[in-house]
Image: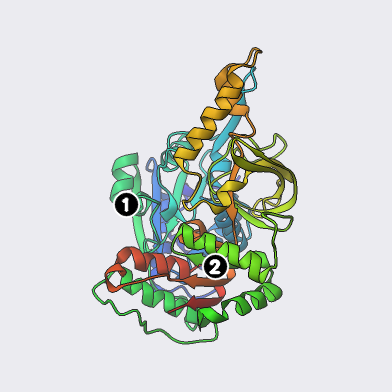
Amino acid sequence: MPAHPSLISTEIHQRSLVDFLDFEPTGSQSQAIYALARLLSSQRPRCALLIKGYAGTGKTTLMRSLVKHLTSMGSEAVLLAPTGRAAKVLSQYTGRFSSTIHRHIYRRNVDASGRSHFSLAPNKRENVLFIVDEASMLGNDKGVVYNGLLDDLMAYVFSGPGCKLVLLGDDAQLPPVGLDQSPAMDVDTMRSDYDLTIAGCTMIDIVRQDAQSAILSLATAVRMRVFDTEDKNLTLNYSKGPEVFHLDPRDLADELESCYSHYGVEQVRVICRSNRSANQYNQQIRQQVLQLDDRIGGGDLVMIVRNNYLWTQEEGNMPFIANGDLAEVLYVKEQRQLYEMEFARLGLDFMDYPDEPTMEAMALLDTLEEKSSSMSEDKMSKLYAAVKSDHAFEGGPSSLQEKMQKDPWYNALQIKFGYAVTCHKAQGGQWPVVFVDRGYLTDEMMDREFWKWLYTAVTRATEKLYLIGF
């Protein structure tokens, strides 16, 4: 029977992690390897490690080594990420299955009346290491189905005897919406709020094979501005290369068409600074580049912009459809005007969940042009009142609350087109080709939030990066 990791010395863990790395680690990778080895050999309760690492420093490469090391010992690692796209990226880098956090830790239950309830699933594992990537995205938005994603993650992981946690993140990226900094990126916060035995380390050295990348050189230059915002000059000193293009806005349509033809529409993304700008880009891309004139049609790329708990199917593994999930529209039917809004029944393929069956769901098409990130509370209140009024005169055993919970119109998916997105929506994902539009910008606007926005946007590209108007 394999020895438990905590019964193996730090030195043995350390040597094995280096062996599985397949190349000489950088200085900061060596520090992270030592911290991981100490975590694995520790017998203290509620053990965790926060690894901060900037773009190109080899965080995911190190995680691949860690997973191989644990497998060689007969131990298990559970890989998680905040979004479907981030989980897909983590799987590609590590070669192992990765799940979204919400898909792994929540369970949907249906009572005798057919009402759905969500609860925290039991963690039945023992002595398992949980690895959570893109931890800078974690907050406690109460829109999530239980207490808050970070709170629930901590409760879930450490309810399993002997379970440990590795948080991976980049504190130069944007924090969760509405926060100045990510709580999961602060060791003191995690220690005090969750009673953890936690250590931290930071990886800053670019790995040798990525050192010549113009994208990473630019990302490093932008990162320097994140932590030093005194310089208001937008000109950045970085190693120029064929991966980074400064694009005149007049050439955008031609370049997009070329990239769509070469890479495929799903592999190209435009990142904007506002929902309004993303809406404008999406309309222009559909009309001028893709030559689409229907309001929505088969082949369109859409993004869910509000959590939805009605349309997930029993045969699937998604407890709910999460804000930020991407889907391809397979077909459109049953378009109709109702409650002064337009709806359509869509067939959807969620590309970041390849094992999920095709889903058919009602969608609220008015959201496509909404200026805010999702339907305004005022409009949703009016829709709620209208639907509630219709149900109020119905008979039957179901309560009004139950009828509202199951109503297809009130619970229609809120969607936007996904060709152009805000940086928060893009966070956690990577695409071969990314176009970044900085929008209107003054010296006063070049604060830390702007540089974090730009750093997050730049690091979404893996092969080509187009800077629009820079």
Question: x and y percent of residue 59 in the render?
Answer: 47, 64
User: Marks 1 and 2: CB-CB under 8 Å?
Assistant: no
Question: x and y percent of residue 253 in the render?
Answer: 60, 76
Which image quarter holds the N terminus? top right
Mark 1: which secondary structure? helix
Residue type, numbered disc 1: Val
Whichever of callouts 1 and 2 sits on the residue coming sooner in the sequence is 1
Which image quarter holds the C terminus? bottom left
Q: Is residue 156 above or below residue 366?
A: above
Residue 76 makes an appearance in the image: no
Query: Left or right: 172 with respect to 275?
Result: left
- Disc 1 target residue: 187
Q: Which quadrant of the structure image shows residue 72?
A: bottom right
Q: Residue at x 31, y 70 (%)?
A: 446
Question: x and y percent of residue 367 in the render?
Answer: 56, 48
- Disc 2 target residue: 270
Mark 1: few/some/many CA within 10 Å (<14, 14-19, 20+) = many
Question: x and y percent of residue 87 in the render?
Answer: 57, 54
Name the colour scheme: rainbow
Residue depth check, mark 1 versus mark 2: number of the one nearer the observer: 2
How many numbered marks have been drawn onto this rendered protein structure? 2
Foreground residue among 220 and 9:
220
Q: Is residue 459 above or below residue 137?
A: below
Marker disc for residue 36: none
Residue type, numbered disc 2: Val
Q: CA distance from mark 1 to mark 2?
A: 34 Å
